[in-house]
Image (tube, grey):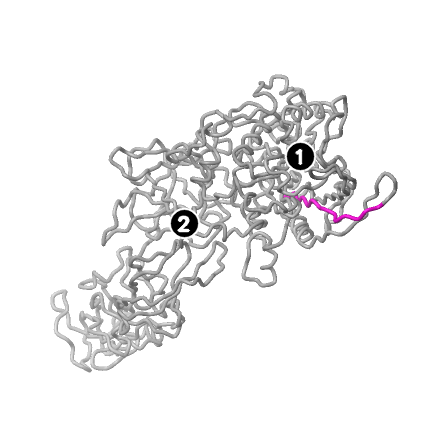
Amino acid sequence: MTEHHAISRRAFTLGLGLAALSPLASLPETAGLGLPVRAAFAEDAPTKAATLDKFVIRLRPAGYFRTASVNEDGNVIGNVCHLFNDGTSSKLILENVTTKNDDTNWYAIRTLLNFEEHRKTGYSIWSVDGDSDKDGKVIHVWSGEHDGKASRSFAFKRQSNGTYIIRDRTVEKETEKKDIKYLAIEKDGKDQDNNKICHKSKSIPWELELVGYSMDKTNATVSSIDWTTYSSYVDGPCWMKYVDDNKFLDELSIPGTHDSGSCSVDNDTEPQTSLAKCQQDYIPTQLLEGVRYFDIRLGKGENPGIDHGDCYLLKKDGNFMHLSDVIGYFNTFLSENPKEALIMLVSRGNDEATDESLTTAFANVMDKNPNLFYTSSRIPTLGEVRGKIVLLRRFRLAGSSVSGHTWGLDLTEWDDKIAAHTDSASMCLVRDERGFEAVGKTSDEKPYCTKVYAQDHYECTGTDKISWVDMALQETAKLTRNEVDVEDDNGAKEQVLERCWSINYTSCTNHKQGSNPFTAARVVNEHLYKSPYINPSDNEETKSDYLKHIGIIASDFVDAALARSIYQRNYDYDTQHKQTASYYLPTRMRMTYGDSLSDASLQDGKTVGEGHFRLVDSSNVLNVAASGHAFAIEYVDVDALGNETVTGLQGPVPIDIDPRVLTPHFEGLEGLKAGEDVRAKVTAPLDGKLENDACTAQLEFMHDANGAPGTVMAEGEAFAAGTYWVRAKDLLGDAAQNYMLASNGAVSFTVAASGSAGGTGSGTGSNADGADKNGKGNKGKGSGGKLADTGDGSGIAAGLAAAAVATTVAGAAMLASDRENAGDDSE
């Protein structure tokens, strides 16, 4: 934050002297100072939009940090939609494609090119790969407009907890053979870059941010009522209403933005290379996301332009942003949400502005809005400043407009103090102000002490910044407030409890080392979001950190998820948002022997995300003999970071257990010669592979009858040169009831005469139904070893040993689950 003259890389490359361009000379005039710019929000009347049509959104799996984006930003046809950390194609626009015969709102999802919200990507429309209804098919972007295809239509069903279940139209209705397909991710539970978005039969909850409205170059965006109606982050516009009036602002954890207006920068590059772009959303959206601390830099003029160094900033309509616009945003938001309070740090953004020009401009704002600002140096309670803007000032006062106003807390020594503070083990004390002030309705003056601690180490990479951010979190969390002396004009001292602002800037850049605000934020924001101070974990040593106060966190590229993770610690978020459980107990379950209980199908029940049911008593054995019996099960909730919580949802549920279907696959059928122990050679390749199973296969060897199995060979009958067949006749053993053969797997093989090169196995004949259609071998669960545990700790083994006809011979056949091999789907 201490930099004043950041300029975009493009400006350096082109040699453009932005000061010489004098952009403020042609800045268009906007609404008068302090007038609410209602066009910055969707509509004047407090009525919600009827549908999600034309809204710009961001999507993420519930609880995740990453959002839905597109590989290579959708500039290549067929690019896959995936999760990405601050992807520049993370903004999507919804287009209503409902027809007159539909009773559900269907939307096309289109990817926008960048954060400015004006253009779609070259290939923007979301579509299911191959228009397929097959489970696991990826979503990619394609060309053209919506053409009525079911694979390009999506329905958004809002849940009681604000999340959404999103489905496509490839399967209209659930049938015995086809499941409805829901928007999901390829690797469940993996909050990582490039995790592909696909459709599956099992739904996951998505969180939706309502970040903008339309692609037109207007200032129309989202109203508070639209946000609370459709966004998953319902507290964003109004979280302070849950906080007690008597709380001092320095006791709150407050999300903020660095260089708040820098979503769109004049004459700038994309965020991957820009040195001036620091935000992905416009200020009106930041307000709805829950941001309450704003870092505003002013340039020259009676109605100063908002700048970041020499770069002037733009509104969504493409016109330059002025101080009047920002005040208008704040005025409108506070009129819609009068329980909220804002903090505004005002600085001189470049050398075109002077202290006198800013003093004059801000005096005009305060004259036109006499009740909007809190300008005392004393830190107030929330009750004192609801509906107001708390002014913090980093410009010096000059000129004739100084008198007649109070000007907020003076932080003009910020830059000098930060520059002199090189200790990475402590925050910098940038202000210690003490005085007396009349408080309340009486005129009695009372002492106050306001200290401001800041972390604003700026010139570094994101990786290097993490230690500074963590230090400030720890310092703020353990901060104690002491009684201090305040001396009056006569030298008398009174004691008062000090109040302490703590401002932690997570922003940084170091272009010499290849870092800029965007690349640094990708590192720092994820670290911050997953910090124990933000998200609780099962680690008892850090769990208490989640309840501690962490002050003002001013970041780059903030979104609703990061903002919520900060503000929700100010009140009992779960109590304020008790929801009907989005998961519930099934009336019956059905599974295949050896599978995990979490893979069972549910009748009338529901799980969410990675949540699953498990046996209350893990010693219970789930086998075919127990099919239909009722077992006590319980629901385990799993959050996006993998933390498991056993819920109170439990009860007895009948579980139907089907036998595992197996198909024999014979090996070792080559090189056989008359006079050898052919039976032993056929069975030898499988010896030991399935030795732990209590189930064997009874094998039969047969003579060939014109290309088909003929008469069964007698026990001990020798193999002469010729063609023979082998098949699985039956299953034997204590665990045999848990399996069934899909086919006998009959396959022919050749025995060569003694002394010849040896025979071959054909793999033809009646084994056709057991051969893998892709030629890769059937490698389902249970092939050559144990199946996955059932999830209840019983550890059922599902491999099979084999038996020869008349005598049991271990390992004569490889038996695998008769499941279709998914293969490798192309994108």
Write the residue at 51% across / 24% down: 317
Q: Give the range drawn in magenta.
A: 493-506
- Horizontally, residue 36 falls left or right of residue 794, namely right
Identify the image quadrant of residue 48.
top left
Q: Residue 257, can we see it?
A: no
Total marks placed: 2
Identify the image quadrant of residue 727.
bottom left
Element on which disc 2 rests = loop
Label 1 crowd bin: few (<14), some (14–19), many (20+), radius 10 Å: many
Quadrant placement of the C terminus: top left
**Alpha carbon separation for disc pair 2 and 1:** 42 Å
Q: x, y percentage for residue 226? A: 44, 36
Identify the image quadrant of residue 487.
top right
Q: Do the residues under discs 2 and 1 have CB atoms within 8 angstroms?
A: no
Residue where numbered disc 1 is placed: 374
Q: Residue 235, can we see it?
A: yes
Q: Based on the picture, tell me whether residue 502 belongs to the magenta stretch.
A: yes
Q: Based on the picture, tell me whether residue 746 belongs to the magenta stretch.
A: no
Q: x, y percentage for residue 352? A: 70, 23
- Asked whether 387 or 201 is in front, the reply is 387
- Horizontally, residue 293 falls left or right of residue 202, namely right
Q: Quick check: 672 above or below 79?
A: below
Nearer-N-terminus badge (2/1): 2
Residue at the far top in the pictured view: 26
Residue where numbered disc 2 is placed: 205
Viewer-nearest of discs 2 and 1: 1
Label 2 crowd bin: few (<14), some (14–19), many (20+), radius 10 Å: many
